Structure formats: structure tokens, C-alpha cells
Image (cartoon, rainbow, N blue to C red):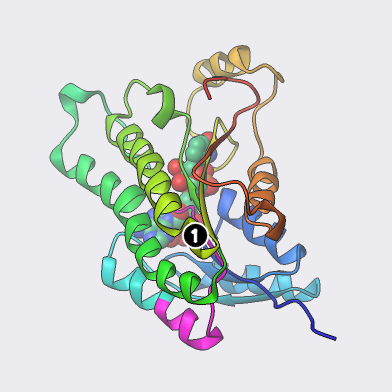
Amino acid sequence: MSTAPVRVAFVTGASRGIGRAVALRLAKDGRHVVLCARSAGPLNELKAQIEASGGKASVATADVSDSASITAALEGVIKQHDRLDILVNNAGITKDGLILRMSDEDWNTVITTNLTSAFVACRVAARAMMRGRFGRIVNVASTSGIVGNAGQANYAAAKAGLVGLTKTIARELGSKGVTANVVAPGWIETDMTANLGDDIKNGVLSMTAVRRLGTPDDIAAAIAYVTSDEAGFLTGQTLVVDGGMTMTS
Ligand code: NAP
């Protein structure tokens, strides 16, 4: 009797927020989750938590804004497991400012961390996934990349870029059993949104059909489906998970 392989999932930005919830959910669903962020401390704690619940996890530190760093981390995982089934490019940052005052540095840092990192990770993952004739790539974008957001030219451009990158990968790798999709969250309660004022928060709430803010688990549930074996006919799509805030796609 053949047993199904344990899927190996690499999740960036797993130290907190959405990435942490994704890691916990994928581990609960039976994946071996490789936890990636810049420092090992929170990742080791999460690994222990996953293992205490009977799950499988390991830690791979990397700075995703450094092409050599994320490449080495992914190559190490592929060498160790001789496979890579799921890649969730979730790590991201904001450096907000109106266009008139946005520096080249803030533009470049956000593009490198939020977009170039995903390109580099997909490039490494693609080879292993094609070899295994199975792959699930998810790039975590944002509604800002779809409808725009004042003060986020850099962030919105990076997130919109992920959509084009993802559709292209979907076309290039579809015949090899590899799917690529975007999950685009609306407002999710994490460190990233913690310091935005009540006026902005209330504005978002008033536009959100379900009349609540999102949780990291809302996004983890969507990513669990998109990365599942049964989602093989879903590719090149942008799944907007925003409680009905934008309803644009
Ligand atoms: P968060 O709580 O601020 O967490 C960001 C994560 O990214 C952390 O794990 C952080 O790890 C990691 N990270 C940042 N820079 C990194 C780097 N250079 N190298 C490696 N890891 C790095 O953010 P979040 O709210 O969970 O957001 C996760 C993703 O969802 C992001 O792509 C974000 O743009 C997107 N998103 C969020 C919202 C929202 O409302 N929260 C809405 C739409 C889209 P370390 O700092 O430990 O390295």
C-alpha cells in the first residue's frame, strides 16, 4: 500500500501575523512546514508549538530582501528533503508615504522585500516543483495592489507586480503540475496594522460587508485550500480575502 508523501511547505514571514497562522494551519493539515524569517528565536518557539501538537516543522532563517540569503535557505531545504511542494511568499513590509515625499530608498526597499524576493524564491522553487511534477505557489499580495491606496505607491506597486509574476508562473509551470495563485488580504489585525489610527480602522470597517476586520486565520484558511492537493485546477487567480471590502475581482 502506498502512502501519500508528506508535503513540504516553505512559509516566509512565519515569525508572526499572517505567516505564523499559515504555518500553524499547514502543520495542522499534515504538512512539514519550514518556518522562515530573519531571526531564529520566534521561529524556534513556533516549531516547538507545532511539534507539541504532533506536527512537523523546521526553521530556515533568511532575509528575503537578500537574493543570496533566500536562495540559500530554499536550496538547503530542497537538498534536505529532496522536494519542495508548497511555497508561500508572505514576508512583507510597508514604508508608507505620499508620492511627493517618497524617497528612492523607501521605494526600493519595499519593491525588493515584497516583490523581488518572491521572484527569487519562485525561481528556486520552480526547479524542484517541476522535478516533482507537483507544486503550489502562493504569493501574498494585498487589496492595495488591486485598487491602490493613498500613501502606498511602493507597496501597491509591489503587490500589483506579484499578480503579473504569479500569472506568468502559472502559464509557464501549469503543464508540470505546478499552480501559482495570489491571495490578497484586506485589513487583517496584525503588527502591520496595529499602529494605524482608529479613524482609518473605522473607515475600513464601514466599507467591509461582513462588518469586522480580518484575522490571520481567515487568510490561513484560504491559503490552506489554495495549496491543497485538490486545488489543482485553480491557477493564475487572485483570491481576494477582504470581507467584501473591495469586491473587484
Ligand atoms: P507582520 O505581522 O508585520 O509580519 C511580517 C512578517 O514578514 C514577519 O514574520 C517578518 O519576520 C517577515 N519579514 C519582514 N521583512 C522580512 C525580511 N526582509 N526577510 C524575512 N522576513 C521578513 O505582517 P502581516 O500583517 O502578517 O503581513 C504578512 C503579509 O500579508 C505581508 O506580505 C503583507 O504585505 C500582507 N498583507 C497584510 C495585510 C494586513 O492587513 N495585515 C493586508 C494585506 C496584505 P521578521 O521581522 O521576524 O524577520
Which of 215/246 is in front?
246
Which of 146/44 is in front?
146
At 50% from the left and 19% from the top, the residue drawn is: 200
Residue 14 picture location, percent across and down = 54, 60
Quarter of the figure with residue 2:
bottom right
Residue 158 placement, left or right of 104? right
Considering only vertical position in the picture, is 72 above or below 185? below
> From which residue to which does the magenta span run?
75-91
Q: Residue furthest front?
A: 175
At 45% from the left and 54% from the top, the residue drawn is: 91
Q: Secondary structure at mark 1?
A: helix
Considering only vertical position in the picture, is 197 above or below 57? above
Which of 202/148 is in front?
148
At 76% from the left and 63% from the top, the residue drawn is: 29
Residue 131 picture location, percent across and down = 48, 76
Q: Amino acid at mark 1?
A: Ser
* Magenta span contains residue 143: no
Residue 10 placement, left or right of 7? left
Considering only vertical position in the picture, is 237 above or below 227? above
Question: Is residue 137 at all visible to an observer of this figure?
Answer: no
User: Dot 1 surroundings within 10 Å: few (below 14), some, or many (20 or more)?
Assistant: few
What residue is pinned by disc 1?
175
At 43% from the left and 68% from the top, the residue drawn is: 125
Considering only vertical position in the picture, is 15 above or below 161? below
